[in-house]
Amino acid sequence: MAASLRTGAAVTAALTQLDRVSILAEALPYMQRFAGKTIVVKYGGAAMKDPTLKAGVITDLVLLWTVGIRPVLVHGGGPEINSWLTKLGIQPEFKNGLRVTDAPTMEVVEMVLGGRVNKGLVSLIQQAGGKAVGLSGKDGDLLRARQMVEKDIGYVGEVTKVDATLLRSLVASGYIPVVATVATDESGQALNVNADTAAGEIAAALQAEKLILMTDVPGVLRDKDDVSTKFAELNIKTCRELTQEGIIAGGMIPKVQCCIRCISQGVTATHIIDGRSRHSILMELLTDEGVGTMITG
C-alpha cells in the first residue's frame, strides 16, 4: 500500500513538472517575439490593494524584464490617495468618475503618487531582482497637460504632449521605468491625469509593441454579468459598433477609446485584462489563449 501511494505521488509530481515544462515551451515563441520590444502596463485597481496580487504583478514584470522584454509601468493610486486625504481631514469627492482636485487635494495626490506609491513599487521591483527607476510626469518634461476647466473639477488635466526621451534612455539602459501620472501645464502647475490615458499616450510616444490596461473586470463582455461572453479579440471597427449598440458602456468606454487612440498612433495591440487574476500579465502575453480582450487595428 505504501509503495502504491509513493508511486502515485511520483506520477503526480512528474505530471506537475511536465505541465510546467509545457507552459514554458508554449511561452518561448512569445518571449522570442517580444524580446527587445517595449510593453507599457497600466497598473491600478484591486491588483494594487491586495498584497498577493501586487506580488504577482511585480513578479510578472521582472520575469518579462529578465527575458529581454522592456516593460514600462504606469500607475495610479486612488485608494491610497483616499486614505491619506481622510487622514488629513479632506473629504474625497468625485464627479462623473473623476476626482475633484482642489489645491490641497493636488498636494496630496502628488505626494502619494510620486512618493509613497511610486517608490514603494520601485522597491518591490528591486527586491524581486529587477532594476527600476521611479519618476512622475514632471520629470524630464515627460507629461504636459491642460486643465479640464469645463468639467469644474480643479487641477485635473488631459495630456497634450509626451516627451519620451528620458523613458527611452532608461529602457535602453536596462531599467524598468515606474511612472506616476502627475503632469504639468505650460505654467508649471501640477495636474492630476487619468492613468489609463497617460499610459496610452506614453505607449504611443514610445511606439510600444503593446499597451496593457489592468482593470477589475475580465475584459470586454457582451453581457456584463456573464464572464463566458468575454471577447478574446476585437478590432477598432467592431469596438465602435459595440459602443453604438450599448454593449461597450459605462466605465469600459474610456478604456476602449484609450486603446483605439493608442492603436491609431502606431501601437501594435492593446489588452484589457483582469488584474484580480494572478499572473494575468504573463497569461495574456505568453500563452496562446490569453485571459483578457486584445484590441487591434
Image (tube, helix red, strand yellow):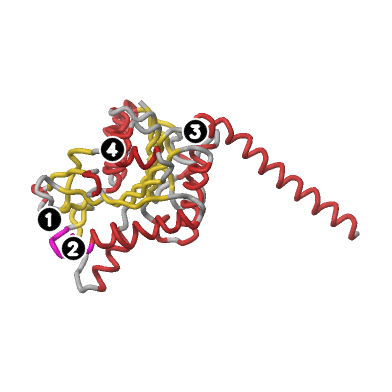
Q: Earlier in the sequence, mark 3 or mark 2?
A: 3
| Magenta-span inclusion, residue 156 | no
Q: Amino acid at mark 3?
A: Ala
Q: Earlier in the sequence, mark 3 or mark 4?
A: 3
- For residue 36, above or below residue 73: above
Q: Earlier in the sequence, mark 3 or mark 1?
A: 3
Q: Amino acid at mark 2?
A: Thr
Dominant secondary structure (helix, strand or loop) of the stretch shown in magenta: helix
CA–CA distance in space, label 1 to label 2: 9 Å
Element at badge 3? loop
Element at badge 1? loop
- For residue 235, above or below residue 150: above
The magenta stretch is: 101-108
Which quarter of the picture shows residue 174?
Answer: top left
Residue highlighted by disc 4 = 165
Q: Earlier in the sequence, mark 4 or mark 1?
A: 1
* Residue occupying image coordinates x 59% and y 33%: 28
Instruction: Assess disc 4: are there few (<14), some (14-19) or many (≥20) residues with their C-alpha within 10 Å of its C-alpha.
Output: few
Tell me if label 1 and label 2 are in contact, CB under 8 Å. yes
Task: Using residue 7 as the reference point, say whether residue 274 is left or right of it.
Answer: left
Residue highlighted by disc 2 = 105
**Disc 4 versus disc 1: nearer the observer:** 4
